[in-house]
Amino acid sequence: MKQLEGVNLRKAAVIGCGFVGSASAFSLMNSGLFSEIVLIDADKDKAEGEAMDISHGVPFSRQMKIYAGSYDDVEDAAIIIITAGANQKPDETRIDLVHKNVQIFKSIIPEIAKRDFKGILLIVANPVDILTYVSLKLSGYEEHRVIGSGTVLDTARLKTRLGEHLQVDSKSVHAFIIGEHGDSEIAAWSSANVSGIPLDSFCEMRGHFKHKEATREIAEKVKNSAYEIIQKKRATYYGIAMAVKRICEVIIRDEKSILPVSSMMHGEYGIEDVVLSMPAIVGKNGLETKVPLKLNDEEQKALENSANTLKKILQDLDI
């Protein structure tokens, strides 16, 4: 893979200026990663309002240009972040959103593909694994250039919960949520550790011995986090905005960090032709290589079930 050519590494585009898009743009403004951010929305006034509001914070941050634009403005962007889509309502699953948001993507992705865009497409809208698959098929781009935010946020939620449970810095916790970003997601407990110490051993060191009950409860809380937030405040956006910022900085700085992003499966774990969130090395070219996790039999079976859940939905889509 060659380094990205013909792109402005200091430019990002955000398509969709709802809660997630505007929070992501605000997070990116504060990050200093970019000197130019273009906001695009079907509602041009909304994009202009968000661009104006965010740009008024520039004097307190780093110098940059933030403006509302059109698809013509994405051509030289290093990263296009797509957050456009219907919002998840209380009591609605991410999968319930699929048909509405696939239709929206059928209008967005061909518009991008018409331009000479050579950067990375970062899909954030839900259901993210399905929409990443749809984006790959509709764009015709190389697979390494089209990634989804996947379970990056779910993994952060898992680390947060474990850090609270063990009273240890969450950055010292190494564990992944894998599979679907949704109800069939899996906490890969068998590979979890705290600074190299197996999770069960570290738990016992901290006075916790009921491992099965604790891990079941933590995984359930992580899975239901979004539902709980949506029930209380109608939408989730700050956590995912920080996840978007993290993925962007890994790409722009070529960090080669390992993140559980959405990518196409090609026989790994016996799974084909479906996009799942799995750990991968991410850098300047997008997805560099997948990182094989050693799963136990229960996790392997759960991952296959997660893949089948998504495959059934893909079969009903006209793409």
Image (cartoon, rainbow, N blue to C red):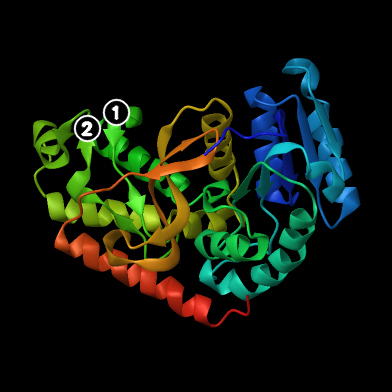
Front residue of this view, candidates 303 and 193: 303
In the displayed structure image, the side of residue 194 where residue 316 appears, left or right:
right
Query: Which of the 4 quarters of the picture holds residue 181?
Result: bottom left
Asked whether 73 or 89 is in front, the reply is 73
Residue 271 image offset from top left, x and y in percent: 33, 66
Left or right, residue 284 beside residue 99? left
| Residue corresponding to mark 2 | 194
Q: Is residue 26 above or below residue 228?
A: above
Numbered disc 1: secondary structure: helix
- Looking at the rendering, which quadrant does residue 230 occupy? bottom right
Q: Can you say which quadrant of the picture contains the C terminus? A: bottom right
Q: Is residue 101 left or right of residue 15?
A: left
Between 100 and 260, the residue placed more toward the observer is: 260
Which quadrant of the view contains residue 7? Answer: top right
Q: Tell me: residue 54, above or below residue 234.
A: above
In the rendered image, is residue 88 in sight? no
Q: Are marks 2 and 1 in contact (CB under 8 Å)?
A: yes
Query: What's the mark number on residue 172?
Result: 1
Residue 25, percent from left and from top: 70, 37
Q: Residue at the spot x=91%, y=49% of the render?
A: 45
Which sits in the foreground, 187 or 140?
A: 140
Q: Amino acid at mark 1?
A: Ser
Above or below — where is 265 with respect to 20?
A: below
The amino acid on which the numbered mark 2 sits, given as a three-letter code, is: Val
Picture layout, residue 7 above or below residue 140? above
User: Separation of disc 2 and disc 1 at Cα?
Assistant: 6 Å
